[in-house]
Image: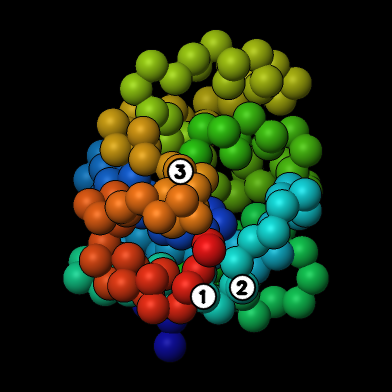
Amino acid sequence: MAQTLKRLGIMGGTFDPIHYGHLVAAEGARHAFQLEKVIFIPAGRPPHKTGRKISDPHHRWIMTELAVASNPYFDTSSIEVERPGYSYTIDTVREVRNLYPGAEIFFITGADAVLEILNWKNVNELLEMCWFIAATRPGYPLGNLKRRLAGISPEYVKRIIPMEVPALAISSTEIRARVQEGRPIKYLLPEPVEAYILNRGLYK
């Protein structure tokens, strides 16, 4: 039976790998927007990242599970990993709405991802169904975001809320590069995730 929640967060991302920046952003949004739960949903097959090799979805989902295990307000879902074809946010939000009818949904993702929102599938319907929290690193030029959103109706633009997250100076790209170069990744991501990466030989 579906849980009855009034305010629900979805943390979307490739999580290749998940790191403290993602966790701090989710916890910050949970506090600021009084979310009762945040569900981390790793992208199965992201349509916007076809140009680079992405780790197996099941590795990314397991790392996400390991990362959120200690927070009682966090959960994970493998719906995108299990869904065939490309992972579109609109399909995920529809599915979450069916699981949690009546919940107000807040989709948390990086501001860089939101910059591409005009290219997302069914963007107007998506912005009707949920709020977007655009997590930014300090000093991020919000003018870029405002210019890119100029093509969206003002009633929808107000449903995209920037939120500064200092820990987003950490990036998955940097972590992958460090592993490849044999440099330390300790304290950039939870210890169980670090152990999983090293034990499985990911990013070598």
Instruction: Left or right? Give the position of 44 relative to 159.
Output: right
Relative to residue 55, is residue 86 drawn left or right?
right
Is residue 104 among the parts visible in the rendering?
no
Q: Secondary structure at mark 2?
A: loop
All told, the count of numbered labels is 3
Residue displayed at 68% across by 36% down: 117
Q: Nearer the viewer, mark 1 or mark 3?
A: 3
Q: Secondary structure at mark 1?
A: helix
Q: Position of residue 88 (x, y in %)?
A: 71, 58
Where is residue 65? Give x, y as percent: 37, 74
Numbered label attached to residue 161: none
**In front: mark 3 or mark 2?**
3
Residue at the spot x=52%, y=33% of the render? 111
The residues bearing labels 1 and 3 have C-alpha atoms spaced at a distance of 18 Å
Q: Is residue 169 above or below residue 103?
A: above
- Tell me the residue that label 3 is attached to: 174
Q: Position of residue 97 (x, y in %)?
A: 55, 65
Question: Toward the viewer: 159 or 10?
Answer: 10
- The kind of residue on which mark 3 rests is Glu
| Cα gap from disc 3 to disc 2, whole angstroms | 19 Å
Asked whether the residues under the numbered discs 1 and 2 touch, taking CB atoms below 8 Å apart as contact, a structural biologist would say yes
In the foreground, 15 or 144: 15
Type of amino acid under label 2? Asp
Residue 35 percent across, percent down from the top left: 30, 53
- What residue is disc 2 on? 56
Q: Nearer the viewer, residue 9 or 18?
A: 18
Q: Which residue is mark 1?
A: 59
Image-based side of 43 in relation to 75, left or right: right
